[in-house]
């Protein structure tokens, strides 16, 4: 039987003990908030204690533990511990409103619920909204928070058994779930995506082989651990290699710059907004970035000005592409890629197939825009308790991403935006991402979102919502359209213009287009 075949496999989920056996004294995790540092041996011992806790509460053989917390070591304990017990980790966003949390808790139905102290009140309200959640609640907190702790909560640390020796682990199949990660959708309650052990391992392999991760790599993990970015972008692949992950409750641009310098960060992946804020920070010019081997931008298009700022510092910055349902690391920039391909996400990773299809499902010719579909052993299994959405997204062996893309003559993939964001103006298709890229080159534009608005003549036209750079002044629509002449066809030009003090974001600092459209409608 192949080691990746279905059926019980002793290696499945054995992340911490396997790595601790190989590199026990290598530093695995740094908590930048407290200054604590953990070796792989120490993380495995913590995971053994957590595994005993989970088993005591029935969170084994498919049992679920939900967590509402910022990034902290307890989440790492629970990831490794669910691997050991056959349990399933379901981290939930602390940014969700209580009714949304309640709906997700109903869906996940955890046997154990771990809550960081700042979010206790929201979780209490969520549980009131939930219909039938019977979970043991444990509080996780930082030393010094005891004064404000609710008296009716047991704490995570006090509940952990003292025994940290190896635990007896069940045989787990690669097809068994390990993570329930909810989508980053900004409309409606997010869907819970079922991530199997196989998907976690294969994404790690695709990332290591595609990006060239090394055992001496160090990364500040800026994505939240309720998001696929917090686990599968770099954290688990680096643990696979024996590298070091730096976490914190909160990261601001100055903190990130300091961590890169003091910890010798070698790899950084962040959304464009974070990379822009780092480049705009007062400490940017005096921070030593020489340890960085490469930086990846993901979660939306990275503007040319941001790429130029990092390139000017000698940093290899390129764009990536992923989603909760597949990967998320699906593409790689080939060796020696030319700068003129910087607006692409590269070519498919080793064990990823990609295609562009038309509305009728047929593959389009190179250069044509269609929906991007992906196929890989690192794809998720589907959505929890949602057969209709699972069939629509994962049907026929391909993951329908909902993103528009094209392939150029050299085989590089370019993301053109979401299918639902495309609009028709005077019978012509307009892709907001293309228009935004052109507007971003206009002087004084820090960020821009183009949304469709109603128009009596053309049906719909684009409205450009602009966030200005520091000290920049507002400009007229006529001036912007004059700038776009010769760069974009006239029907793609925005016919409305508005300025925002700050573009709304959702999830892990991603632009919230729905909020922009609602706020600037008309």
Image (cartoon, grey):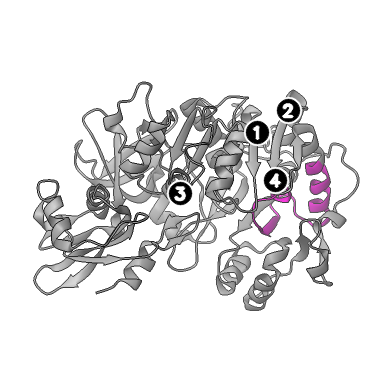
What whole-number distance in Å separates the C-alpha atoms at marks 2 and 1? Answer: 8 Å
Which is more toward the observer, 258 or 401? 258
Element assignment for label 1? strand
What whole-number distance in Å separates the C-alpha atoms at marks 2 and 3? Answer: 32 Å
Q: Which residue is mark 3?
A: 277
- Residue at x 73%, y 69% (from the top left corner): 134
- Residue at x 38%, y 61% (from the top left corner): 503
Label 3 crowding class (10 Å Cα cut-off): few <14, some 14-19, many 20+? Answer: some
Count of labels shown?
A: 4
Range shown magenta: 46-75
**CB contact under 8 Å: marks 1 and 4:** no
- Locate residue 356 relative to residue 298 in the image: left or right: left
Q: Which residue is mark 2?
A: 26
Work out which residue is located at the far bottom of the displayed protein and give it: 128
- Locate residue 406 relative to residue 205 in the image: left or right: left
Q: Which residue is mark 4?
A: 76
Work out which residue is located at the far right of the displayed protein and give it: 162
What whole-number distance in Å separates the C-alpha atoms at marks 1 and 4? Answer: 13 Å
Where residue 122 sits: x, y (%)? Answer: 65, 72
């Amino acid at each position: 039987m192949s080691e990746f075949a279905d059926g019980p496999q002793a290696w499945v989920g054995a992340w911490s003990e396997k790595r601790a056996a190989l590199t026990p004294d290598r530093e695995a995790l740094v908590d930048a908030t407290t200054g604590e540092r953990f070796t792989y041996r120490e993380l495995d011992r913590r995971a053994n204690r957590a595994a005993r806790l989970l088993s005591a509460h029935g969170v084994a053989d498919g049992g679920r533990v939900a967590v509402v917390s910022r990034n902290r070591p307890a989440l790492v304990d629970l990831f490794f511990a669910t691997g050991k017990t056959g349990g399933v980790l379901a981290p939930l966003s602390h940014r969700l409103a209580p009714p949304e949390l309640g709906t997700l808790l109903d869906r996940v139905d955890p046997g154990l619920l771990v809550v960081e102290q700042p979010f206790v009140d929201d979780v209490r309200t969520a549980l009131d909204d939930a219909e039938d959640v019977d979970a043991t609640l444990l509080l996780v907190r930082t030393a010094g928070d005891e004064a404000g702790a609710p008296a009716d909560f047991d704490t995570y640390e006090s509940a952990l058994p003292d025994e940290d020796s190896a635990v007896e682990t069940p045989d787990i199949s690669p097809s068994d779930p390990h993570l329930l990660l909810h989508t980053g959708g900004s409309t409606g309650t997010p869907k819970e995506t079922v991530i199997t052990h196989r998907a976690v391992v294969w994404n790690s392999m695709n990332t290591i082989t595609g990006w060239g991760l090394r055992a001496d790599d160090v990364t500040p993990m800026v994505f939240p651990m309720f998001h696929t970015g917090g686990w599968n972008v770099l954290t688990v692949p680096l643990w696979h290699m024996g590298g070091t992950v730096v976490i914190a409750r909160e990261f601001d641009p100055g903190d990130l710059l300091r961590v890169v310098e003091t910890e010798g960060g070698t790899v950084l992946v962040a959304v464009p907004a974070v990379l822009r804020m780092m480049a705009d920070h007062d400490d940017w010019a005096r921070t030593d970035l020489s340890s960085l081997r490469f930086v990846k931008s993901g979660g939306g298009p990275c503007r040319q000005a941001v790429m130029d700022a990092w390139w000017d510092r000698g940093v290899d910055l390129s764009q990536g592409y992923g989603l909760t349902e597949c990967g998320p690391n699906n593409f790689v920039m080939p060796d020696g890629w030319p700068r003129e391909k910087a607006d692409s996400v590269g070519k498919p990773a080793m064990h990823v197939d990609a295609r562009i299809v038309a509305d009728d499902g047929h593959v389009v010719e190179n250069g044509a825009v269609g929906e991007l579909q992906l196929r890989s052993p690192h794809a998720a299994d589907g959505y929890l308790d949602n057969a209709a959405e699972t069939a629509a997204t994962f049907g026929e062996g391909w993951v329908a991403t909902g993103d528009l893309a094209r392939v150029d003559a050299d085989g590089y993939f370019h993301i053109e935006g979401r299918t639902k964001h495309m609009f028709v103006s005077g019978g012509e298709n307009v892709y907001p991402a293309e228009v935004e890229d052109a507007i971003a080159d206009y002087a004084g534009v820090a960020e821009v979102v183009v949304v469709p608005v109603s128009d009596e003549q053309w049906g719909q036209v684009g409205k450009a919502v602009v966030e200005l750079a520091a000290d920049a002044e507002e400009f007229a629509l006529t001036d912007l359209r004059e700038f776009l002449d010769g760069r974009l066809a006239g029907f793609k030009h925005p016919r409305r213009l508005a300025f925002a003090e700050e573009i709304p974001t959702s999830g892990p600092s991603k632009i919230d287009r729905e909020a922009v459209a609602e706020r600037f409608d008309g």
